[in-house]
Image (spheres, helix red, strand yellow):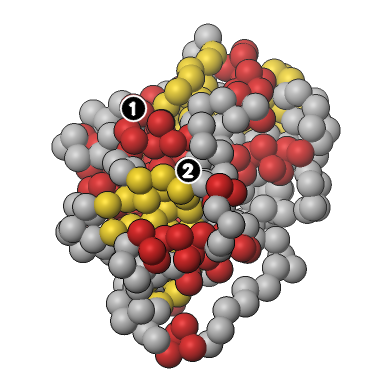
Amino acid sequence: MASTAGKVIKCRAAVAWEAGKPLVIEEVEVAPPQAMEVRLKILYTSLCHTDVYFWEAKGQTPVFPRIFGHEAGGVVESVGEGVTDLAPGDHVLPVFTGECKECAHCRSEESNMCDLLRINTDRGVMISDGKTRFSINGKPIYHFVGTSTFSEYTVVHVGCVAKINPLAPLDKVCVLSCGISTGLGATLNVAKPRKGSTVAIFGLGAVGLSAAEGARLAGASRIIGVDLNSRRFEEAKKFGVTDFVNPSEYNKPVQEVLAEMTNGGVDRSVECTGNINAMISAFECVHDGWGVAVLVGVPHKDAVFKTPPVNFLNEKTLKGTFFGNYKPRSDLPSVVEKYMNKELELEKFITHTVSFSEINKAFEYMLTGEGLRCIIRMAD
């Protein structure tokens, strides 16, 4: 790779020219990394619902043309000035949020919300100079959440790159750079269920099932899946879910159903839908005295959380989380090791694999609700 260092690389990228239109495989030029940046060769990427949401451009500022993608695994091709902890050939996971290691959040053991590199979905340029590293015939192509992994090569801030075990299979561990870690960490790092406890998971998509996987790893004796789609229940058994509740099948609030099932409420709940009513139910269903509810799903910006304050006085706890409270550079390598040590099972999250030229099939699978994660193999 040394022969390409410092030079513009021409490669294939899947470009979104317009909102909601199929991606087009184009030849793009990828500029060399600037100070505190690295250029990565992406080997595998996967499609997350966040990519689809911003590709559809529903309810947010549209930025096009753009290269989406933020769940991926690859190898460092070259590094920019000032980069000391990564070198060409390192195996890495690019991450949509970062860890500068210098701000108050990064220095705190309690936070992963880096001041410098926190996710910004509107920004389509690099933070160092406000310019893109992608272009076609001199025309800029915009970045997405600082990663843009639907390209054979991409440029990322060094603080958004986690160096991992080179023996880890990138076609599996690439899913840890977003959704799976978000759900897993929400349970293990924030809810922290004790062995033998009862945990409710609201929403059984990929993030919810990874939260269930976290409860399984923690030794929960009962994991209750809550979802309006009963077809998801069979699949959820693979992730340790023992009981299922479809709120539409009851004529009472689901929090009352759960309280009756568990002798007063669950010990922990993790909400992964972003629906405000599910969020309220997830909080109100936990047991008084020790129950903890964790909110993961992103609600509508105008949504308001309403619950009687006496719930807090009765010692129910409500928490929120971002990326499962994992610091990308410091913590993701150890999550990869959980997979390598056969504690964490990732294969069951991966339901499809397509070649890069078939990337639009991945969008079809996501839009029709077919499967969990689709891996996109960059080499056709």
Asked whether the residues under the numbered discs 2 and 1 touch, taking CB atoms below 8 Å apart as contact, a structural biologist would say no
Residues at marks 2 and 1, CA–CA distance in whole angstroms: 17 Å
Q: Residue at x 36, y 59 (%)?
A: 261
Where the N terminus falls, by quadrant?
top left
Q: Residue at x 56, y 84 (%)?
A: 308
* Helix, strand or loop under label 1: helix
Judge by depth and name the residue closer to the eye, 204 or 362: 204
- Judge from the rendering whether residue 195 lies leftward or rightward of residue 369; answer left or right: left
* Quadrant in the rendering for residue 180: top left
How far across and how far down the image is residue 372, in percent? 49, 31
> Is residue 266 among what the camera can see?
no
Judge by depth and name the residue closer to the eye, 321 or 252: 252
> From the viewer's perspective, is the residue at label 2 or at label 1 nearer?
2
How far across and how far down the image is residue 143, in percent? 67, 42
Q: Amino acid at mark 1?
A: Glu
Question: Dot 2 corresponds to which residue?
Answer: 204
* Label 1 Cα crowd, 10 Å radius (few <14 / some 14-19 / many 20+): few
Question: Dot 1 corresponds to which residue?
Answer: 347
Residue extending furthest toward the top: 380
Instruction: Tell me the tag on residue 192.
Output: none
Which of the marked residues, 2 or 1, is nearer the chain's N terminus? 2
Indicate whether 201 appears above or below 26: below
* Helix, strand or loop under label 2: loop
* Label 2 Cα crowd, 10 Å radius (few <14 / some 14-19 / many 20+): many
Indicate whether 206 appears above or below 327: above
Q: Residue at x 56, y 32 (%)?
A: 47
How far across and how far down the image is residue 32, in percent? 57, 36
